[in-house]
């Protein structure tokens, strides 16, 4: 099946020359089914040699269109731009650091032939569970979805721009499709896998931005709160709660660890807006669990916090202690007394 007139590919990038080279090796390989499609690269004003690499490939492949934004508009805004620019029947937005397996591409062609609204081409968050809440979770991964552009009306694109601060603007058409009781087609075998290298790569959503120009809400946004914001658009309340709880288990392991992480992220920093953002999207039982946990931690807690501080709360009175470490010890300065804990033995010494 020839998809040249049906499928439009966008690739978003910013300062990822190393990974972009790997991506190009895959999408322009001899066995790649998309190498001759219209491929538009949206470049967020890269300055690490990425632009020069794209131009080298553009000389070899005239189907490449290279758009360099005047400014780094951020990864999420770049995603929305791709959806806004799409004019063919289907759009597929790719990132610059993922892994592809073209052996199951025929299933994609069949789904397009059947006129599916959304084709989910990744499965690492789904496995054997193809429930709708699993599909929503999987589609947080940008390249996981191939979308029918007829669903991208003006209201959808407008809402996607609203959600730029919340990490997942590309979930808006997914939730719109689900709210309208339309089906998401999930492939039997994945085409794209997450290739992000977390240890050696800056993967933050504010990468390349001047943090002084960002609101506190944006700077303090976390994955799960952003996801809850998007899930607030789901009309089916039971499905919304299932989707959020599925994500909590996937990201945090269990609800108790999620509650601890919320304390670490938001209680000490007093980012209450984010706490309430997710609180109001939980069911009554989990709201009660989260709120009581927070109240208890406001009264009695002892834990590490941001910026090399250790915090103790007793009856709501908060005391912050500076912490640091050397090769052998973790050290807390407490009212002029150094409390040292040996990293190997765990023994504690006062100095």
Image (tube, rainbow, N blue to C red):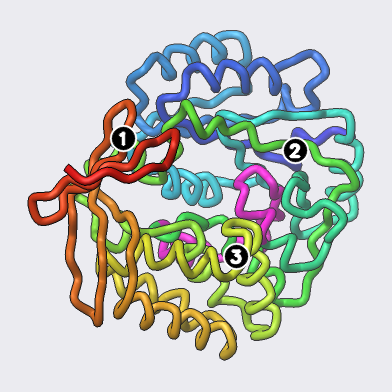
Residue 344 is at least partly visible in this image: yes
Camera-side residue of 180 and 220 = 220
Which x, y percent locates residue 74? 37, 43
Q: CA distance from mark 3 to mark 2?
A: 40 Å
Of 100 and 288, the residue lying toward us = 288
Q: Residue 89 appears at what percent x and percent y? A: 71, 49
- Relative to 238, residue 224 above or below: above
* Quadrant that contains the N terminus: top right
Cα–Cα span, label 3 and label 1: 34 Å
Residue 163 part of the magenta-drawn span: yes
Instruction: Name the residue that disc number 3 marks.
Output: 248
Residues drawn in magenta: 137-164
Q: Which residue is mark 2?
A: 5
- Check disc 1 and report the residue beneath it: 329
Going 63% across and 83% down the picture, which residue do you hit?
A: 235
Q: Residues within 10 Å of mark 1 (few under 14, many from 20)?
A: some
What is the secondary structure assignment of the residue under circle 2?
A: loop
> Marks 2 and 1, Cα distance to the nearest angstrom?
63 Å
Q: Residues within 10 Å of mark 3 (few under 14, many from 20)?
A: many
Residue at 55% x, 81% y: name it.
282
């Amino acid at each position: 099946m020839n998809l040249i007139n049906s499928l439009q590919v966008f690739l978003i990038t910013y300062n990822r020359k190393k990974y972009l080279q790997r991506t190009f090796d895959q999408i322009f390989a001899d066995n790649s089914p998309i190498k001759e499609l219209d491929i538009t690269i949206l470049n967020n004003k890269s300055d690490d040699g990425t632009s020069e690499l794209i131009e080298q490939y553009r000389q070899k492949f005239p189907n490449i269109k290279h758009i360099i934004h005047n400014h780094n508009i951020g990864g999420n805004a770049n995603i929305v731009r791709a959806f806004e620019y799409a004019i063919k029947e289907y759009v597929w937005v790719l990132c610059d650091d993922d892994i592809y397996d073209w052996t199951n591409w025929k299933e994609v062609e069949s789904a397009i032939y059947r006129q599916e609204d959304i084709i989910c081409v990744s499965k690492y968050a789904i496995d054997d569970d193809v429930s709708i809440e699993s599909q929503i979770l999987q589609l947080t991964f940008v390249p996981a979805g191939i979308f029918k552009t007829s669903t991208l009306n003006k209201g959808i694109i407008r809402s996607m721009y609203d959600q730029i601060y919340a990490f997942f603007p590309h979930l808006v058409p997914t939730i719109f499709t689900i709210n309208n009781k339309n089906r998401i087609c999930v492939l039997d075998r994945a085409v794209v896998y997450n290739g992000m290298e977390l240890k050696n790569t800056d993967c933050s959503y504010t990468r390349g931005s001047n943090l002084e120009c960002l609101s506190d809400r944006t700077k303090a946004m976390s994955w799960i709160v952003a996801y809850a914001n998007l899930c607030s658009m789901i009309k089916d309340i039971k499905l919304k709660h299932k989707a959020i709880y599925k994500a909590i288990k996937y990201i945090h392991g269990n609800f108790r660890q999620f509650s601890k992480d919320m304390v670490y992220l938001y209680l000490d920093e007093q980012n209450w807006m984010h706490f309430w953002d997710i609180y109001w999207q939980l069911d009554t039982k989990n709201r009660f669990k989260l709120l009581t946990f927070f109240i208890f931690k406001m009264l009695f807690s002892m834990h590490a916090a941001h910026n090399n501080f250790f915090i103790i709360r007793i009856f709501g009175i908060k005391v912050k202690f500076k912490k640091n470490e050397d090769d052998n010890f973790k050290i807390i300065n407490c009212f002029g007394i150094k409390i040292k804990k040996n990293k190997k033995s765990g023994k504690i010494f006062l100095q």
